[in-house]
């Protein structure tokens, strides 16, 4: 019996090594590329109440308050209290910040990815001073000897803009 188990472990190890060969084409696979049209202008009527998703020296990403209240992270269970706070704050303020309504700072990347993927955001490139009208994203899966990862990669004109890790399995 022991020899059968040892043989199975050896076969599984050899098979695993052949799957995880150093050839990056076999390790990293992309899913379908999807082009997403974003909100194309900083329309004052649309953004009279707004939520800043991200604002740094390169990009500004924002969404209208009503899109924020009906989207991520509030579609997750356990966010009712923060949604109530956002609704209340939205009646008092014209601008909210995503970071004030997250249970974990790690949720910010997935929140931004949600709005990019759905097209419910405005993206402004501060360096070129232009509105980004569309982006594209692709799903990916990366397999290595120690883990398997999958997620989404978002691109602006073929340049990687944002990457999420939606699933991580450690061996």
Image (tube, rainbow, N blue to C red):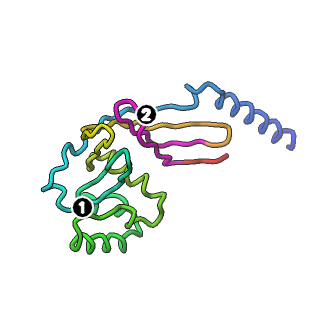
Q: Residue 82's spot in the image, x, y percent? A: 36, 71
Of tags 2 and 1, which is closer to the observer?
1
Q: Looking at this view, is 95 or 18 the one in front?
A: 95
Residue 109 image offset from top left, x and y in percent? 43, 52
- Of residues 9 and 51, the one nearer the viewer is 51
Image: magenta residue range: 148-167
Q: Is residue 8 left or right of residue 36?
A: right
Residue 162 x/y as whole percent: 43, 43
Q: Is residue 43 above or below residue 155?
A: below
14 relative to 131 in the view: left or right: right
Disc 1: CA contacts within 10 A as few (<14), some (14-19) or many (>=20): many
Residue 63, placed above or below residue 80: above
Residue drawn at 27 percent across, 40 percent down: 129
- Which quadrant would residue 19 be assigned to in this image? top right
Question: Can residue 37 be seen here?
Answer: no
The answer to whether residue 25 is visible is yes
- Residue under label 1, please give it: 65
Contact (Cβ within 8 Å) of mark 2 with mark 1: no
Residue occupying the point 22% across, 74% down = 92
Q: Earlier in the sequence, mark 2 or mark 1?
A: 2
Q: Which residue is mark 2?
A: 31
Residue displayed at 25% across by 43% down: 38
Residue 95, how many percent across, how many down? 26, 64
The residue under the point 68% across, 37% down is 145
């Amino acid at each position: 019996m022991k020899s059968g188990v040892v043989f199975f472990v050896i076969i599984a190890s050899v098979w695993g090594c052949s799957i995880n060969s150093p050839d990056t084409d076999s390790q990293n696979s992309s899913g379908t590329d999807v082009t997403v049209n974003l909100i194309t202008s900083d329309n004052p009527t649309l953004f009279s109440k707004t939520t800043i998703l991200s604002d740094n020296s390169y990009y500004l990403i924002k969404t209208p308050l009503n899109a924020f209240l009906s989207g991520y992270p509030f579609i997750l269970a356990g966010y009712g209290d923060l949604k109530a706070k956002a609704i209340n704050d939205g009646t008092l303020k014209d601008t909210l910040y995503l970071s004030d309504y997250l249970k974990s700072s790690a949720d910010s990347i997935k929140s931004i990815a949600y709005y990019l993927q759905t097209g419910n955001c405005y993206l402004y490139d501060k360096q070129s001073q232009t509105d980004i009208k569309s982006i594209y994203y692709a799903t990916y899966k990366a397999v290595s000897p120690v883990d398997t990862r999958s997620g989404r990669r978002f691109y602006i004109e073929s340049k990687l803009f944002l990457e999420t890790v939606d699933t991580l399995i450690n061996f």
